[in-house]
Amino acid sequence: MTQPATSPERFGAYTLHEKLGQGGMAVVFRGERVGEAGFKKKVAIKRILPQYRRDASLLERFAAEARTNARLDHPNLVQVLDFGIEPEPYLALELIEGVSLSQVMQRLLARNETLDVSAMLFIAAEVSNGLDHAHRKRGDDGTPLGIVHRDMSPQNVLLSNEGAVKVSDFGLVKAADNVLKTASGVTIGKLSYMAPEQADGRDIDARADLFALGVTMWEMLTLRSLIPPDDPARATQLLQHGGFEPPSRYRKDVPSHLDRLVMQCLAIDREARMPSAQQLGAELREMLHERAAGYDRQQLARLLAWLFPEKGWAIPEPDQPAAQPSPEERASMVPVTPATVAIARHADSERPPAPAVPASMQLEPGRITGPLHDPSLVEGLAAIPRGSLAPPQRVEPPAAARPANAAPASALAGPATTGPRASMPNALPSAVPNGALPGAAMPVGVPPGMAGPPAKAPATTSSKTTRRVLWIAGLVLLVSLAFAGFGVLALGVTGWHFASQRQRGSLRIESSTPGLELYLGPTPIGAAPRDIEPDELVGQPLIAVAPGYEPRILRAERIDELTRLDDHVERIDLAASRLPSTILYVRYDGQGTAYSNEGFGVLGSVPGALRIQNGSAASLTIIDDQSGRRVEVHWQPCTLGSLCVLDAR
């Protein structure tokens, strides 16, 4: 819950505003860093609570976790932007404008609503992506870092108003675990989401996070607590012996495959759990594609805008152009401090100081030292303040002291002297020696007639030599291009040879479901068991249907993954259903997105297979991805649990 601050607080380079939340060992504020030329960056500042700021062990662990978190760079993890110890230890984190998953679940309960299965699959898949990145992270020497979240829960899953899913507080519990347990006797972490091995104090690995994610998925589907937080005895019994009920026990529309996946994550024996977050994410994404192929961040953002209307997160419809500022609003966006002024000020501050003048050339009032031979300059030079950066005024010697053929010094003005030499005495001789280059620097204090022979101009290359050099360079370039062309041709032939030799594996479908029929896209291919050869796999989804059973779609991307290296056997056993869905294959020229006409959001991409829930209206709207054209199409009702083909071309 955001708490308004009485007044902004200056905190090092940041300004702290309202408090965003507080945990067991830290408090988080909304912060802002202001720079030059109107630069502003909003951040979240996490500070250790006062009672832990003097604990050397905790501070060292906090710093170590900051270094570890700085290595993580993934769109599904909250980014660490800065770490410091002055004026007190803190972490500067990416500020997420949104809500936590816990808040979403509480709002759904208050409205007596449930979380759509597609939204649950999307959120869980995104969380799996972030966890997988952290679990697989290695150090600079290639050694696995062994990062485990240890506190994966709905409170630590943040959902932005743009539909992004971010895992927060990665590794913070690990940093505080031993210290806080020793100091207070309380195990850090939420018992309701702890894996059995973590609750027992045993060594843990990444599969502990998969157990916690399984609990989170179970609760997203049921909006109930799986492991009671206020009954430690019951929680301990469940963690020791299991006995969890599947989510379908409380929600009938949970697909059987998802039921089994959640229960696998909740296995007491970690060897029986899903082996990795990467595998879990792949399974979740496949189910999401089967159920709602087009579900993405925009759909989640619309759900959040509907759940939290007071936030003002309304998103315009896809066919509406983005809002633009008015001329008056655009004019008000000009920063107070122009960037050019800030850059100029920075350049002035970094200009190198003038070089120190040797002691033999330092000027002191009333005395001249160094090789200045014109005594008539003494009076003028002695009047220059010591250390002055302003160039001294040129002093004309008396006419009697100049040679007869010498021009006045004022007539010899060349390019203005700038830079460090501007602060040094100008001791050019009163006449430019014959043959000297215009603007060339003369030795300080060299009297007329002693400048030596004139400098010779550099010799120029003859035109004949220039043509020879250019001819040779052109010849070398042509030879290089010829060799490069032969190399590309050889690589292309070699690559074609290997590509032609490489064979994709075949796919065998087995099933014990009676009456099961298989389709590749809209084309029937028979019943199981069925061997599908590589040349039959032409980028179409595999669809399995049977009367009285919920159909299943195996997307083309998943088929490609399964058969990429070898033959694969896939077993498809459909779940019995009294009211199964209908699979609608839509033929369409181009690419488009199909939307429900009953407010169910995205149905999927077309051309492709769409899952239509029983009882839905026999119509949908297609929005072309390229032109934005909207087409409303209708179809005749199909047999339940069958495949229908709709031509929308």
Image: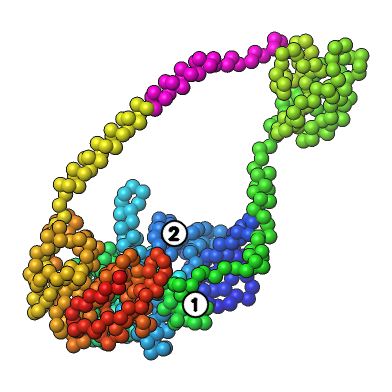
Q: Amino acid at mark 2?
A: Ala
Q: Is residue 455 magenta?
A: yes
Where residue 314 is drawn, which disc sits there?
A: 1
Does any portion of residue 321 appear in the rendered image? yes
- Region in magenta: 451-477
Q: Is residue 263 magenta?
A: no
Number of numbered markers: 2
Q: Using the image as rendered, state which of residue 154 and residue 295 is in the foreground.
A: 295
Above or below 608: residue 256: below
Please name the residue shown 42% across and 25% down the image: 474
Q: Using the image as rendered, state which of residue 190 and residue 308 is in the foreground.
A: 308
Q: Which residue in the rendered view is the most extreme toward the front? A: 649
The x, y position of residue 264, in whole percent, is 21, 73
Please name the residue shown 34% across and 60% down the image: 134
Dots 1 and 2: beta carbons under 8 Å?
no
Above or below 110: residue 295: above
Colour setting:
rainbow
The x, y position of residue 288, in whole percent, is 29, 72
Does residue 382 appear to the left or right of 35 in the view shown? right
Q: Using the image as rendered, state which of residue 26 and residue 71 is in the foreground.
A: 71
- In the picture, residue 642 is in which quadrant? bottom left
Q: Secondary structure at mark 2?
A: helix
Which of the two discs, 1 and 2, labels the residue nearer the N terminus? 2
Alpha carbons under labels 1 and 2: distance apart:
35 Å
The x, y position of residue 180, in whole percent, is 41, 70
Please name the residue shown 46% across and 78% down the image: 305
Please name the residue shown 46% across and 22% down the image: 470
The x, y position of residue 521, in whole percent, is 20, 69
Residue named by callout 2: 66
Q: Nearer the viewer, mark 1 or mark 2?
A: 1
Q: How many C-alpha atoms fall within 10 Å of the one at disc 2: few (<14), some, or many (≥20)?
A: many
- In the picture, residue 256 is in which quadrant? bottom left
